[in-house]
Image: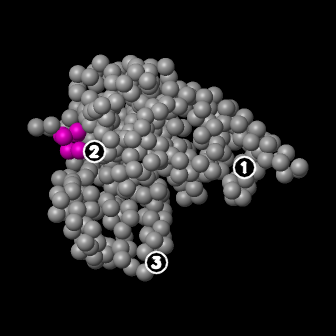
Amino acid sequence: MMVYYILLVVSGYYTQRQEPVAAFTELMKAHSDESAHAKIAGGLVWGQNRTLWTAPNIVIGIEPKNVRVVDYNDTPFEFADDELLAAYKVFEASDSLKRIRSLGNDLPRYMLTRYGANFNKSNPILTLQLRKTSWGQCQFVWHNRYYGEENAVEKQDMWRESIISEHMNSGLRVANYPNSLCLHLVIETKDGNVLITEISKEKSNDYPTTKAVSIGEQLELSDFVDQRDFQEDFVTEWTRRAVCEEFGLSENQYAEVFDERSLRVLSLDFEMDIYNFTIVSTIKLRQSCEQFKKVVGSTIEQKEISDIQEMALKEIPEVLMKYPENEGEYHPSSYLRLLMFYLYKNGYKRTCKEFVRRGRKMHNQVRGKNEE
């Protein structure tokens, strides 16, 4: 709490003296982990996540067909570094991974290896290069680099910091380690609220019981490759599958409940609590939250989602400005997802002004308490 209040004072000091855009940058830094805002270079950051690419016009986003897989390497990833390979072999021999493999759960994953963007603002295109990896390799990078060693947690934190630093220093466009490209879908209700889902307590490897905005889904081969070629609009295919699986909908129900024409891509994000990359998109419901809950009440995948709520757009700044005080209430990626959606609905100027206003108010409240 002391660190939190110090951050408020520092951010308040800057927001009192700067223009809204510069002051907003200081607020982002004050409400994020230090590693996340290192070399911010025009990116957006909140909590433990940051953007690597954002739609040139954030209030429009880009159409999903303009996110394209331009290269796929089906040769499974291998660790080239001898030390890493040796450590991975130790992890492979662990009882936990052997048990997972015996159940057939060490599934293929699809890692981002490189991304790029064109310079045509009237027709922006985001390109992705992918490679085959595995769930086990991702787990090794995310959590088990020093499996079974003394001070494993401390060493793992140092390892994660080193690969994140390496990525940040590489120009940000290349990913050198296994990851599982994910879709982070922000669902907007008919009346303009954000759909909030509570992650099931059974998802022990993905922040159980925290709140997500709104669902996340790892990429599958069928999402971006059909029987003969690349899918022309793989984000749309991916979104449809993710929504149908998470909420137990048929494709006909999906078409009735969701306005697929509203689907827009907002950003490519870097999840720095692990080492992962996500495409943040948004889609609109044709129903209110309550109507939607009635539709999916008996079909929702309860091993994934334990509850559905909603958040009004005007509540988003308060949630974000409470970080890190409310860290642990939301999935680590939810904070940046909320910021991207708020920008999508309000644009940069309005967002900067609103957050700076709140920053000054919080600073004055803290100063008043200190004077008392």
Residue 151 numbered tag? 3
Coordinates of residue 82 in the picture (x, y in percent): 29, 76
Q: Amino acid at mark 2?
A: Leu
Coordinates of residue 192 in the picture (x, y in percent): 50, 23
Badges 2 and 1: C-beta atoms under 8 Å apart?
Answer: no
x 28%, y 62%: residue? 137
In depth, the one of 264 and 318 nearer the eye is 318
Whether residue 334 is situated above or below residue 134 in the rendered picture: above
Q: Which residues are magenta?
A: 220-225
Q: Residue furthest left?
A: 228
Asked if residue 353 lies left or right of residue 50, the reply is: right
Coordinates of residue 279 in the picture (x, y in percent): 38, 41
Give the residue pinned by disc 2: 219
Badges 1 and 3: C-beta atoms under 8 Å apart?
Answer: no
At mark 3, the secondary structure is loop
In depth, the one of 303 and 194 nearer the eye is 303
At mark 2, the secondary structure is loop
Give yes or no for residue 202 being in the magenta stretch: no
